[in-house]
Image (tube, rainbow, N blue to C red):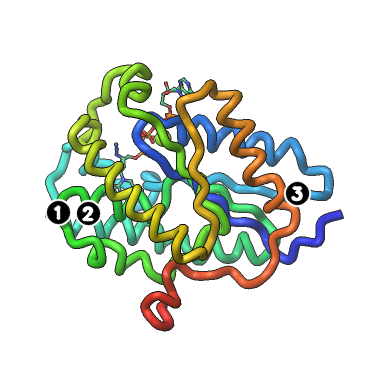
Amino acid sequence: MSNSKRGAFIVIEGLDRSGKSTQASLLHERLQDSQDGTIPKVVLLKFPDRTTAIGKMIDAYLRSESELDDRAIHLLFSANRWELASMITAHLAEGTTVLADRYAFSGIAFSARKGLPYEWCRAPEVGLPAPDITLFLNISPKVAAARGGYGLERYEKEEVQKGVRQVFDKIGQAMREEGKGKWVEIDAGKSKEEVAEELWRAVQPLVSVVDGPISKLWETTLGGGS
Ligand code: Z5A
Ligand code: MG
């Protein structure tokens, strides 16, 4: 039987077309199928959540149907996480595992790439529920390109993706140095099945034993947070 006091918070991040949504869905299924008493219930979230009122504004922006100041859209992406933050905390507290397809790290990476200051981009994310583990799907631009042309949305351009990769590298390094919540890099250039297996190896030990309070993103860094 499980000795969990709460659910695990698992985030899947990564570069464009690295297979985040594919892997999030495979991991979700695998966690659901493994509910043998050792693994708790699981919910899958996707950021941006385009179904909320804020999410609809983000969706229009991403499809270039509306224009917004860079800072305004950054704050909307962050607000889209905050509107689900208490729900995430409640799920974790009642023992449900939460799996998120993208999170605050995407928010920082895409906005800092535009030239907004890194610390300014990070500030609205401070105090959000912190993942217990972030699985970062790494893929070379060559392999990503082989997965088909960039789509029609605003950031799906090669030069944008290069800049985003650099900021993600900085975030990953900082997360590893801080040692708060695991940041695990996964080679996403392999087959879907191989990548899924690697993700499973990383999360399986965690989901059945997670314990302790739910921490908050970068709370201690800024001396107390939210
Ligand atoms: N954004 C932001 O600016 N600020 C924020 O705070 C957040 C996001 C949260 C929309 O996000 C944009 O919002 C995004 C970042 C920005 N802009 N960009 N670029 P989104 O999450 O909605 O984006 P998406 O449309 O889902 O694309 P994606 O996430 O980059 O794709 P993916 O989820 O990583 O890949 P996939 O859909 O799972 O797979 C892509 C294709 O590759 C598909 O045909 C698969 O069948 C194939 N695939 C997947 N895995 C494999 C393997 N292993 N081998 C071969 N082929 C594979
Ligand atoms: Mg996706």
Furthest toward the right, the residue is 1
* Kind of residue indicated by mark 1: Gly
Q: Position of residue 101 (x, y in %)?
A: 47, 43
Residue 117 percent coordinates (x, y): 18, 62
Q: Quadrant of ligand 2?
A: top left
The answer to whether 206 is drawn above or below residue 146 in the figure is below
- Residues at badges 2 and 3 in contact (C-beta under 8 Å)? no
Image spot of residue 219 (x, y percent): 44, 74
- Rounded to the nearest angstrom, the CA distance separating label 1 from label 2 is 5 Å
The residue labelled by disc 1 is 115
**77 sits to left or right of 195:** left
Mark 3 or mark 2, which is nearer the start of the sequence? 3
Say which residue appears at 51% left-offset and 38% top-offset: 186
N-terminal of the pair, mark 3 or mark 1, is 3
Report, in whole angstroms, how far the alpha carbon at label 2 lies from the one at label 3: 37 Å
Q: Quarter of the image holding residue 140?
A: top left
Q: Is residue 106 left or right of residue 214?
A: left
Judge from the rendering whether residue 178 lies leftward or rightward of residue 116; answer left or right: right
For label 3, the residue is 39
Mark 3 to mark 1: distance in Å? 42 Å
Q: Give me the disc on residue 112.
A: 2
Quadrant of the frame with the N terminus: bottom right
For label 1, the SS is: loop
